[in-house]
Image: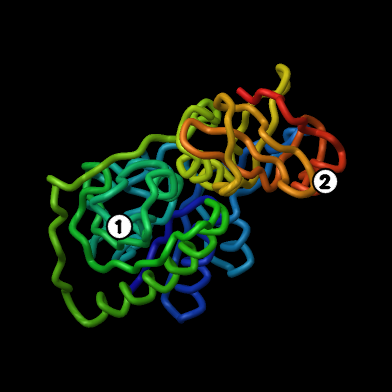
Amino acid sequence: MKIVYAGTPEYAVAPLEALVGAGYDVIAVITAPDRPVGRGALMTPPPVKTLARKLGVPVFQFDKVSLHAEELRGLGADLMVTCAYGQILSDEILEVFPMGVWNLHASLLPKYRGASPIQTAIMEGEEHTGVTVMKTERKLDAGDILLVKRCEIGDKTCGELEKELSLLSAAAAIEAMVMMGEGEPQLLLQDEAKATYCKKISKADAKIDFSSPAGKICRLINAMNPDPLAYCEKNGIQVNILGAEPSECDGEGKPGEVLFADKRHGIIVKCGDGAVKILSAQFPGGKKLSDRDLVNGRKFGEGDILS
């Protein structure tokens, strides 16, 4: 089988590396154009491009892949594998590959179709998530399912869960190729009645509402780490909250009020239901500070209001 692989971010690196490492014939990689990064706006290649170059696989970078159907057809590939590619594929692109286009989607479909399945699963308090290999069609993440792999979420941050799911996607990609090599596999229809959707996350979505229950706030903080980072305001200054956990140490106060800020209790903030203990935070222009550093530096004080 000749395979074209489409992916862009770090998440999509492990599946490509696994396919090539297992001896599959990846004849081309499609990824996003180089983008300016950092204060110097240095043009930087996507992680998938960097790996493809290292592996000696030809790379195509299209602003709009839908305009390049004939170019892709000329490669003579049998199928395409996509993982966090970031572009919607047109009918013309889907028709290029005789054995179809197969997407490695980071949720247990039909739940969390869309742009932020990992973050949304954490925020919604799911116990499990996983990777679904599905046959791509024009409707968003609605294709028939080839296989599913599951993992526990626990108290992982989005960054930690992404790394685990990336490796799970790599294993799923290999398993999918084995199934393809054995003949036309049987697929499972998605249950449209159970389908849910998730939007692209913005910085505004990361604002902490301390009138919410403590558990919900902690899930939001985990979901937004490492990007775009959950935040609140203290005396008009934006503070990124990198880690927190529900606290058994509660008391009277209004939502957002710092109940304790000492070595015995740590930093305890009142919520709409319960309280949270801040484990790490970052002030503007500063580095990540642990709860101990925050207490020692008197970054928070009893009676402060976080909004």
Q: Residue 102, how many percent across, how many down?
A: 30, 60
Instruction: Note whether 10 is above or below 231 in the view shown.
Output: below
The one of 233 and 23 positioned closer to us in this rendering = 233
Which residue is at a point 30% across and 57% down the rendered structure image?
Answer: 108
Q: Residue 86, how many percent across, how many down?
A: 43, 43
The residue indicated by pointer 2 is 293
Q: Taking 246 as reference, is 25 left or right? A: left
Instruction: Note whether 217 is above or below 245 in the view shown.
Output: above
Which residue is at a point 17% across and 73% down the rendered structure image?
Answer: 185
Disc 1 crowd rating (10 Å Cα; few below 14, some 14-19, many 20+) is many
The one of 271 and 107 positioned closer to us in this rendering = 271
The one of 12 and 79 positioned closer to us in this rendering = 12
> Element at badge 1?
loop
Q: Residue 68, how many percent across, how many down?
A: 37, 43
Report the residue that reaches farthest toward the front.
252
Q: Taking 152 as reference, is 181 left or right? A: left
Which residue is at a point 62% across and 38% down the rendered structure image?
Answer: 35
Disc 2 crowd rating (10 Å Cα; few below 14, some 14-19, many 20+) is some
User: Of circles 1 and 2, which is in front?
Assistant: 2
User: Which residue type does callout 1 highlight?
Assistant: Leu
Quadrant containing the C terminus in the rendered view: top right
Alpha carbon separation for disc pair 1 and 2? 39 Å
User: Which residue type does callout 2 highlight?
Assistant: Asp
The residue indicated by pointer 1 is 108
Q: Residue 31, how many percent across, how many down?
A: 49, 50
Report the residue that reaches farthest toward the top.
236
